[in-house]
Amino acid sequence: MLHSHSNQQQDITYFVADLHLAQNRPDITACFLRFLKNDAVQARVLYILGDLFEAWIGDDDDSAYIATIANALLTLANTGTKIYYIHGNRDFLLGKKYAKKSGMILLPEVELIDLYGKSVVIMHGDTLCTRDVAYQAFRKKSRSWWWQAIMTNLPLFVRKKMADNYRKKSAAATANKPQGIMDVTHEEVVSCLAKYHSQLLIHGHTHRPDIHQLRVNNKEAKRIVLGDWYEQGAWLKVTPDQIELMNTPLV
């Protein structure tokens, strides 16, 4: 499905990923709220490519914090900026109910978009890391209907506890994995672009912001990796004639 853009905003499209918003990081939250209010409001489209939240325990999480983020996104959507959302590996349980509250349009895990006449593949990026076999096995299980049914039927306080445990385990596992395993597999990138007949891929997940040059279908291609928000605010700004990775101090 190709999206085209039309409203009063300027010809700017923003991409963000890996914000890992959480109540215990008010600095990231404040930076994101400023970004929505000052920058994203000028854009026609904002794409959030996963891991907006550090953890997502279900759309029935009624915390004031989650509501604050939803309100800020909805305020932006109401100004005319379209917000599209692709799930990450931390917030893949985010559902239609929360998306509606936030004015976000949910997209499938890989999407082909029309970006100022260019055909671009966008995704979170975790599926490109095929060497991380343990993670890919967990990913497969956690995306199954039965696993999600079990999870979403557990009481909210149990899910909160499980999310905290998972975060600790995940941090420990990540610390012990060789860097190469957690980065994308080149062959997977090439086959993804070839499959969608595209020369440009935009993704997050690896927390290694950069613009990589490669060859696909015997043509020049680019892979743009979005930055995470642990140390600074980070986004990709695209206009009809420029592509730029940008960042800003958290405070």
Image (cartoon, rainbow, N blue to C red):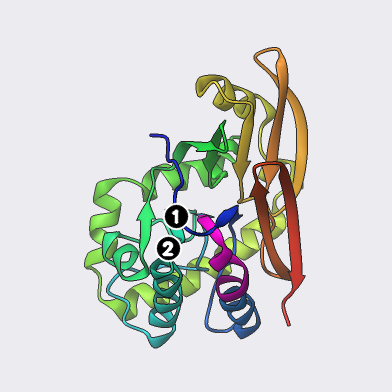
Residue under the point 69% across and 62% down: 234
Q: Which of marks 2 and 1 is in front?
A: 1
Decide: few, some or many residues near mark 2? Use Cα within 10 Å; few <14, some 14-19, many ≥20. some
Secondary-structure class at tag 1: loop
Task: Please say whether residue 126 is visible from this viewpoint.
Answer: yes
Residue 100, by quadrant, is bottom left
Residue 157, by quadrant, is bottom left
Q: In screen coordinates, is 133 left or right of 137?
A: right
Residue under the point 42% across and 75% down: 75
As displayed, is residue 26 above or below residue 91?
A: below
Q: Which corner quadrant holds the C terminus?
A: bottom right
Q: In screen coordinates, is 23 left or right of 3?
A: right
Disc 1 marks which amino acid? Answer: Asn
As displayed, is residue 249 above or below residue 1?
A: below
- Report the residue that reaches farthest toward the front: 8
- Report the residue that reaches farthest toward the top: 218
Seen from the viewer's position, the closer of residues 92 and 106 is 106
Seen from the viewer's position, the closer of residues 51 and 71 is 71
Query: How many numbered marks are there?
Result: 2
User: Which residue bears the numbered disc 2?
Assistant: 80
Residue under the point 71% across and 55% down: 176
Disc 2 marks which amino acid? Answer: Gly
Q: Which corner quadrant holds the N terminus?
A: top left
Residue under the point 37% across and 69% down: 102
The numbered dot on residue 88 is: none
* Residue 16: % across, % down: 59, 57
As displayed, is residue 166 above or below residue 44?
A: below
The numbered dot on residue 7 is: 1
Name which of mark 2 and mark 1 comes first in the sequence: 1
| Magenta extent | 35-47
